[in-house]
Amino acid sequence: MIILDNLGEFRKGRLWINTFPNFQCTTIKTIKTIVESNNCNKINIYNITLELLLMPRHTSNYGLLGAKFTPTNKGLLEIQVDVSQYNGDITKDSIAMPEDEVHVGIPEEYAHSIMQTSISVIKEIGGLPSGILQFNLGAHGYVGSSILIFSKITSAILKLMTKKVDVDLIREIKEQAAIEINLI
């Protein structure tokens, strides 16, 4: 886990690359879509999880989202979002506000935002190679989460996956993550 302590005032983050937080989501269904793929962008990070807390103007926005990319030779990009129950297991290991109750999983309302944002960002960055992009891990707060925070996290994850970074250089990863997060 990488602590993102370079995001500026009122922002906290944690990032996992090729590792995962210590919990699992129970999937009740998976929403899928297929988009055209191309080789304009290369995937440099195949497994990534981003946890983010934004605290502007006395409100909080919290979310955790994990994604993995599996290359294929099908010539298409399949996007999958694993949907969980809204009231999944409670986790105490989060950076959410202390008064928020954080549940493991990706509720359906956030899953649709993740899907829509994925399609939009993939078009914006010029596409992704052939494969399966699966959002399979998440956590949300009863009070502090929103469609908007999951959209922002999705955007940052996709842009980080395609950045040419040395995953062994933590400083470089933290700098690139701060750039992507502060753009949202």
Image (cartoon, grey):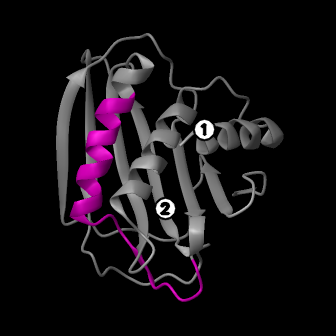
Residue under the point 53% across and 52% down: 49
Q: Quadrant of residue 104?
A: bottom left
Mark 2 = which residue? 64
Element class at badge 1: helix
86 or 57, which is in the foreground? 57
| Whether residue 88 can be seen here | yes
Q: Residue furthest front?
A: 57
Q: Residues within 10 Å of mark 2 (few under 14, many from 20)?
A: many
The magenta segment is 97-121
10 or 86, which is in the foreground? 10
| Residue type, label 2 | Leu
Q: Is residue 71 left or right of residue 46?
A: left
Mark 1 = which residue? 180
Residue under the point 44% across and 10% down: 40
Q: Is residue 6 left or right of residue 55?
A: right
Residue under the point 41% across and 62% down: 138
Q: Is residue 12 left or right of residue 107?
A: right
Q: Quadrant of the N terminus?
A: bottom right
Mark earlier in primary sequence (2, 1):
2
55 or 120, which is in the foreground? 55
Measured as percent of width and height from the top left, residue 92 is found at 56, 84
Element class at badge 2: strand
Q: Quadrant of residue 69?
A: top left
The question of residue 45 being in magenta is answered with no
**As displayed, is residue 47 above or below residue 59?**
above
| Residue type, label 1 | Glu
Q: Quadrant of residue 116?
A: top left
Marks 2 and 1 sit apart, C-alpha to C-alpha, by 16 Å
The question of residue 103 being in magenta is answered with yes
| Whether residue 55 can be seen here | no
Q: Residue furthest bottom?
A: 99
